[in-house]
Image (tube, rainbow, N blue to C red):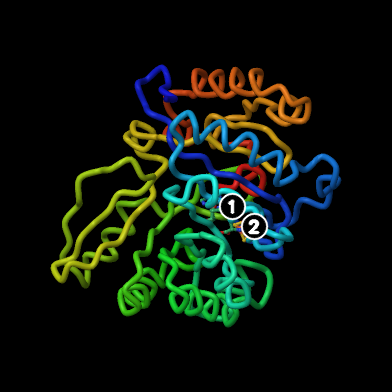
């Protein structure tokens, strides 16, 4: 079992399978990167699988595939199947911008994927285009519908930005409620790679906007990154507030990048190379590195102090 210094049980790994993306979201990678990682530096699926087997044997029971845009990596369904076959009861999830989901959802579900989180930042084609710097909305909406059709669990993620999409909070909430999907509003996390003019809307403001039309109550915090709220009619939505004090208290996750680095915390630059040990076939060493990463997981991120991270979201996978 993986337990850190603050008594948090680490049972969740987010795996970024590529840092490439077909969007250029203002809050993530508006201009960069142009220096894509050379092919040989990227961990092969078999190598990721070797490491993940180790982590699963140590008690990891949830794996989320992310990126960059994970649907850009070839043979993703085969990777999912490897994980599913190793432990069918794993909570196998994916975070995607949804653009290729209408084509791929069925195959991914068949391979063993259980759930998808789909980014949806606007319901207006022009605003979605401004945020992703590409005309995306129609394809993303089709992706959402297809994911529902094939029976995947679906949640929506919205990064709320002042003056860009904060006037759509209620519309997005209603859209999600009509489809019976949970939506989570995410506070923008300041990072050096984002478009400099982006301003966060904090959870208090988000909740104020929602309270103009709905009554809701906060639900007890579990160990997900989100705080959940329940409306009078039973519908639940979430808010992800990394700037709040209790965001990190129940953090149960570490991250693996496409290049084979393990990252204890999304905010900080610390990382541990696991690829070399796996390429050398040195599983004992890989297990030691995994334990070091868990041991050195910081107590909390620095967004709580309103700092700016130097970490790129397209590397860490968010
Ligand atoms: N491309 C996929 C997508 O956009 O869903 C997966 C990778 S993306 C890096 C993972 C998550 O990080 C998305 O939900 C995205 O909205 C979120 N994200 C990226 N940059 C962010 C930022 N600066 N602040 C808050 N969330 C961010
Ligand atoms: Fe791509 Fe996701 Fe980053 Fe947007 S948030 S640029 S879709 S990796």
Q: CA distance from mark 1 to mark 2?
A: 5 Å
Which quadrant holds residue 198?
bottom right
> Which residue occupies the foreground of this view, 103 or 120?
103
Residue visible at 38% across and 28% down?
9
Q: Which mark is residue 143?
A: none
Question: Callout 1: helix, strand or loop?
Answer: strand
Q: Is residue 147 left or right of residue 236?
A: right
> Does the CB distance between marks 1 and 2 fall below 8 Å?
yes
The percent coordinates of residue 179 (x first, y second) are 35, 78
Displayed-image quarter of ligand 1: bottom right
> Which residue occupies the foreground of this view, 89 or 17?
89
287 to 316, vertically: above or below: above
Q: Is mark 1 within 8 Å of ligand 1?
A: yes
75 to 292, vertically: above or below: below
Residue visible at 59% across and 22% down?
287
Q: Is residue 143 left or right of residue 90?
A: right
Residue topped by disc 1: 66
Residue visible at 61% across and 42% down?
316
Label 1: how many residues lie within 10 Å, few (<14), some (14-19) or many (20+)?
many
Q: Quadrant of the N terminus?
A: top left
The percent coordinates of residue 286 (x first, y second) are 64, 23
> Which residue occupies the foreground of this view, 204 or 64?
64
Residue topped by disc 2: 70
Direction front: furthest residue: 85
Which quadrant holds residue 271?
top right
């Amino acid at each position: 079992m993986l337990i850190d210094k603050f008594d948090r049980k680490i049972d969740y790994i987010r795996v970024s399978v590529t840092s490439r993306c077909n969007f250029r979201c203002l809050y993530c990678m508006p201009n960069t990167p142009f220096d894509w990682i050379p092919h040989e530096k990227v961990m092969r699926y078999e190598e990721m699988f070797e490491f993940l087997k180790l982590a699963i044997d140590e008690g990891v029971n949830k794996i989320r595939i992310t990126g960059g845009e994970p649907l850009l990596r070839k043979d993703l369904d085969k990777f999912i199947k490897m994980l599913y076959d190793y432990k069918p009861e794993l909570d196998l999830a994916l975070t995607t911008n949804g653009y290729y989901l209408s084509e791929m959802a069925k195959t991914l579900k068949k391979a063993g994927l259980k759930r998808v989180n789909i980014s949806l930042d606007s319901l207006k084609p022009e605003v979605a285009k401004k945020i992703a710097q590409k005309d995306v909305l129609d394809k993303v909406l089709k992706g959402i519908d297809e994911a529902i059709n094939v029976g995947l669990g679906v949640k929506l993620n919205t990064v709320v930005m002042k003056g860009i999409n904060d006037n759509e909070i209620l519309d997005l909430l209603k859209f999600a409620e009509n489809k019976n999907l949970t939506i989570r509003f995410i506070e923008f996390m300041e990072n050096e790679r984002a478009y400099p003019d982006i301003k966060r809307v904090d959870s208090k403001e988000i909740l104020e906007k929602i309270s103009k039309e709905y009554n809701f109550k906060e639900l007890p915090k579990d160990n997900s990154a989100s705080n959940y709220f329940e409306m009078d009619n039973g519908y639940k939505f979430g808010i992800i507030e990394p700037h709040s004090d209790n965001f990190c208290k129940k953090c149960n996750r570490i991250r693996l990048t496409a290049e084979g680095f393990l990252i204890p915390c999304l905010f900080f630059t610390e990382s541990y190379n696991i690829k070399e040990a796996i390429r050398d076939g040195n599983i004992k060493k890989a297990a030691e590195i995994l334990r070091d990463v868990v041991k050195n997981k910081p107590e909390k991120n620095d967004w709580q102090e309103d700092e700016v991270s130097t970490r790129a979201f397209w590397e860490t996978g968010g």
